[in-house]
Structures are given as C-alpha cells and as structure tokens.
Image (cartoon, rainbow, N blue to C red):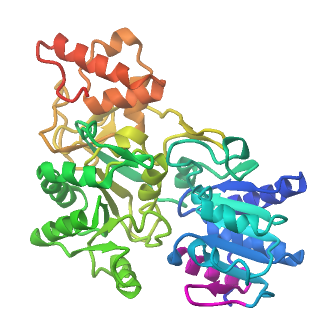
Amino acid sequence: MGDAPVLRPYQSDLIEALRAAFRMGFRAPLLQLATAAGKTVIFAAAAHGARAKGRRVLVLAHRIELVKQAADKLATAGVPASMLVAGGTVPADTCAVVASIQTIVNRLDTIGDFGFIVLDEAHHATAPTWRKVLAACPAAWLLGVTATPVRLDGTGLGVEAGGLFDVLVEGPAIAELTRMGYLAPARYFVPERRLDTSGIATVGGDYSAAGLERLMAADSRIVGDCIDAYRRHASHQPAICFVVTVAHGEAVAAQFRAAGYRAACVHGELPAAERDALIAGLGNGRIEVLCSCELISEGLDVPAVGAVILLRPTQSLGLHLQQLGRGLRPAPGKECLIVLDHVGNVLAHGRADDARRWSLAAGAVRGTGEAPVKRCPECGAANAIAARTCENCGADFPVGERDLTPAPGELVELTRQRIDWLSHQPHHRLRGMVLSEAEVHAVGRERGYKPGWARFYLREQAERMGGPPHANQS
C-alpha cells in the first residue's frame, strides 16, 4: 500500500460537498469533474469514509482498464479491494470489491450485499445491466462519477429524466483547472468546412459506423490532410487518432507508417497484453501515432500525449469531450495539447474549455468566450488582435491586409476568443462580414440559433459575394 495521495484543494472541497449531500438526505449524488482532474482519487476517499462507517463497498466500471485503476487508487486510500474479473470469485464478506459491470451482473447471487456503490464513468449507468446490479442492493448509497454527465441522446442522468442520480456536484471548469496548472492548455485546428454527414444514418444516438466508414473512404484527401496537419503542427509528438472502424484505423496507421511515423491501431479485438503494450508505447516513445477504434476514449492515463487527431464524426458531446480529455493531462515539457479536427467535431460541440452548465435534467448548455483574435495567413493559428508576428510560426502580419482563406484541406485554429467576439457582434455588422462556415456554425451555437440560421446566412453571404450558394448547406 502506497502513501495516501495529497489532495488538491478543490478535491478536498468536492469530498466535503459529497459528504454534505449525503447528510442532507440525498442517496445518489453524481460528481462531475473534468478528465484528468482526479475523479478516482475522490471516489477512493469517499469509499474510505464509507468503510469507516462499516459499509461494504462496490466499485463498478465498464472496462477492465478502469477496474485496475480503481483498485490501485482504493489501495492507496487505505481501502484494500478485491478485483472481480472474468472467471474469478470473491468471498461474500469481502469488504471492498472492484468489478466490471459485465462480470458482476452474472454473479449477483454469490457476491453478497453492498452498502456503498461507486459507478465509474456514470454516463453509462442507465443501461439495463447497471440497473440489474443496483436492484440487487436496494439499500445502498450510490456515487456516480463522470466528466460528461449526459447520455448519448443529450438527455440527463437525473431521476426525473429516467436516470439514477438525485443531486449534481460539479467540480471546477476545465478553463479554471487549466489556469491553476492542473490541466494542459489546448490549441484547436479545424477544417474550413464541416464534413457533410447528412446522408449518414443514426444508430443508437450516433452516426452509423458503416456509414461513416463509407464516407471516410469516399474522401481519401482526409487522411492525407491528416498526415500533413500532424507533420505541420505536432510532428513526432505522441498522438491519439480516433477512427471509425478497425479497418479504417489500420488503413490510417499504414499511411502514417508510409509517411515515416511509428503508428499502430489499437482495438478491442487485440489480446489484452498487446493492447496494453501499444498504449504504453505512447508514453515510452515506441509509438508516435496510435489509432483508436472505440477503445481509449475513457480511462487512458498517458500524460505525454501531445496531440489528438479527430477522424471520427460524432453526434455525442460526451464522446467528443472524452476524446479531447485524453490529451489534457500535463507533463514535463508539454506546452499544450494540439487538437487536429478533420471532421468538424469541435465545430459541432465546441472546445474542451468552453463554459458549460451541466444539468441532471438536460445535459449541458455551452457558454461564451473572451476576446477577438486574428488568424495567421501562413499557418492558421489565432493570435491577439494587436500581434505583429504570429505566436505560432513567427510570420509577419501584412499591414492592412485581410486574413486569407485557407487552402482546401488546411485546418484553421478556432479559438474561444474569436467565437466570442463574433457572437457579440450586432446582426447588421455580421451581415457585412465574410465568415467561414466554421465561424458561422460557431456563432449560431453560441447564440442558441437553430441550424437553419447558419444555412440561411451562408446562402445569403454567397449571394452577396456574387457566387452560388454555399456547397455544404445540407
């Protein structure tokens, strides 16, 4: 057993807030805290308190990697726990158990009762398997923890929305954690136009994987642009590339290797030891680009990750934020996370540090940003409006020259400052500007407009400039 962790001030505050919630009579609080901000440390401390009151503890997760992490943190907090894995058993009187939901749901008649149950990555906890386990322990107090308290369809996790939780306890926002140095800042490079997914079917609340695979295969420029953007903005930095399917990931990894980078694809069909070795390769330099198919959106702890490459369009705010969160852990020598978004997820769902007001009833509502910027015509990075040279590439800004339209496939940096400045402009001034599609959609989201507003604006802008309506108005 290692030394107990030294809690950060906000972690101590959140532990006390959870205790206060239980004292007030709530039986199922949900803790929202950003990825990499220490959710596991907090629920381990809560479990220690439950054990001190004589309650038997169960920690549930949906993946074996999360089970192992939780067991380690519990032991460090002074709560030795048995891991229940496939094929294993634990005595019915074991004081603390950590298990995957898939394993424990078939052993409910042998594990005994529990008085305190932690639901890790609790946005999954509305599934029938989770409810079956909880029904077997009706008197237990619950604690859910997640960075993204929202279902895939955007509805809430509270009891009034059909969920499990009766009070929300929110941690500091990502922007605040970044200012305090607990998370790495991020820079976002986005496409000039969103990927057109209008013909892709929705299955289970998100785009059909088969439809996305066909879409990505139909536009081979995306992967080429992806490699060029990585070489330009994050070359040789450890990167996670989120892909659509295993076949898509293998193809992308092969093209990265052909371009001279150490790349591989990791997915659930690989043996556990091989998956672990590939993920560890991101931290030890053996792997530069790791393509992930539905595997490491949650739970990955590799602070060295310096870039996230988005090649998987998603309708899910939660999945989007989980993917960005894989690179937000700080590390020695790491100045920032580089986000290379080739499919428009940042345009659809925003930056990780956008202000969001979470709710148990209806997911999250995004807030606004800060100040105007200008875009470098050479590299697409955003700079302070008064800058004379680009902070990213050092290029001089031509005096009096307007920003240039990026070349096809080039990513441009979308910042909160730029979005906020545009979203606060009066309508008559907006109608006199020439905005990219990315900027139009961002302004529409910030002002709460329906999607039709962006299509109307782009059509009107095209007519104003004497050209045909914008190509991507579907």
| Residue 269 falls in image quadrant | bottom left
Residue 111 percent across, percent down from the top left = 74, 82
Q: Is residue 86 magenta?
A: yes
Q: Pick whichever, 186 or 51, lies toward us.
A: 51
Residue 461 percent across, percent down from the top left = 22, 16
Q: Residue at x 89, y 74 (%)?
A: 53
Residue 54 percent across, percent down from the top left = 89, 78
Above or below 376: residue 451: above
Please indicate whether residue 49 sits to the left or right of residue 428 in the image. Answer: right
Q: Residue at x 18, y 56 (%)?
A: 232
Q: Quadrant of the C terminus?
A: top left
Q: Which residues are magenta?
A: 66-90
Please indicate whether residue 110 sits to the left or right of residue 63 in the image. Answer: right
Q: Is residue 8 visible?
A: no
Please indicate whether residue 9 sits to the left or right of residue 443 in the image. Answer: right
Q: Is residue 83 visible?
A: yes
| Residue 143 falls in image quadrant | bottom right
Count of all numbered marks drawn on residues in the image: 0
Above or below 165: residue 62: below
Q: Is residue 38 magenta?
A: no
Above or below 200: residue 372: above
Q: Pick whichever, 351 or 294, lies toward us.
A: 294
Q: Pick whichever, 296 or 396, lies toward us.
A: 296
Q: Residue furthest top?
A: 428
Above or below 2: residue 168: above
Q: Residue at x 64, y 77 (%)?
A: 104
Please indicate whether residue 463 sits to the left or right of residue 63 in the image. Answer: left
Q: Quadrant of the N terminus?
A: bottom right
Residue 434 percent across, percent down from the top left = 23, 20
Q: Residue at x 36, y 21 (%)?
A: 452
